[in-house]
């Protein structure tokens, strides 16, 4: 797995700064830069600050570069627990969230595009467009993916406990490092 460049890290920190969310130096130093093992940083990735993740709830701040996409995935039931339910609240910029639907995915006329390297693995087709101040709650076990608008996005996530190792990605090439978690 490749590491993000300093230039990439600086772009992400700039996005967080533009959001005007007050973040400590320690939080900015703790950003988790995830490329999901796809080595396609600018197109597919997710950058997050974990505030808390315990056996009751989780809170994160996520940042995406312009048009950057978090790969399609779902949060299944695991180890006797229900799948993760998460509320996305767009804090800065805008984000396009796509949810599982019975229709075929079409981005025609939307100004969005799928990452060329893995576009065959995006199937969730119900679009929601969240501007700053808008939010949406994703039910457990719902396939979804999301992409930032033209300026990038910062999204707060409030959810039930987060256990990345149980996430199911549509793309079989995805791998995700498992972070240490608060007890």
Image (cartoon, rainbow, N blue to C red):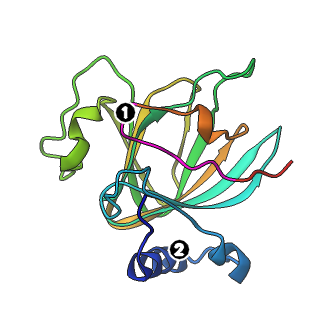
Q: Secondary structure at mark 2?
A: helix
Q: Kindly indicate the quadrant of the structure image that contains residue 35.
A: bottom left
Q: Is residue 172 magenta?
A: yes
Given this view, does label 2 or label 1 mark the residue nearer the observer? 1
Above or below for 77 versus 130:
above
Above or below for 115 versus 16:
above
Who's the residue at 32% across and 64% down the image?
A: 42
Nearer to the camera, 34 or 148: 34
Q: Position of residue 157 (x, y in %)?
A: 61, 50
Who's the residue at 30% across and 58% down the image?
A: 43
Residue 114 visible: no
Among numbered discs 2 and 1, the one appearing first in the sequence? 2
- Cα separation between marks 2 and 1: 30 Å
Residue 171 visible: yes
- Left or right placement of residue 181 versus residue 168 in this view: right
- Disc tally is 2
Who's the residue at 49% across and 79% down the image?
A: 18
In the rendered view of the protein, which quadrant contains the N terminus?
bottom left
Q: Position of residue 137 (x, y in %)?
A: 57, 36
Q: Which residue is mark 1?
A: 172
Q: Which residues are magenta?
A: 170-179
Nearer to the camera, 163 or 114: 163
Q: Which residue is mark 2?
A: 16
């Amino acid at each position: 797995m490749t590491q993000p460049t300093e230039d990439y890290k600086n772009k992400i920190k700039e996005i967080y700064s533009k959001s005007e969310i007050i973040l400590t130096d320690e939080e900015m130093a703790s950003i988790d830069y995830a490329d999901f093992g796809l080595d396609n940083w600018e197109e597919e990735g997710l950058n997050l600050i974990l505030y808390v993740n315990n056996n009751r709830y989780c809170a994160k701040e996520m940042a995406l570069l312009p048009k950057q996409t978090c790969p399609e995935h779902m949060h299944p039931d695991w180890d006797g627990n229900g799948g993760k339910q998460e509320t996305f609240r767009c804090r800065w910029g805008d984000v396009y969230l796509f949810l599982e639907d019975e229709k075929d995915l079409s981005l025609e006329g939307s100004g969005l595009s799928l990452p060329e390297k893995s576009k065959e693995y995006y199937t969730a087709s119900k679009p929601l467009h969240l501007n700053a101040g808008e939010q949406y709650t994703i039910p457990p076990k719902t396939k979804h993916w999301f992409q930032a608008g033209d300026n990038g996005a910062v999204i707060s996530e409030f959810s039930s406990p987060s256990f990345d190792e149980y996430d199911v990605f549509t793309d079989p090439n995805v791998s995700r490092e498992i972070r240490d978690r608060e007890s």
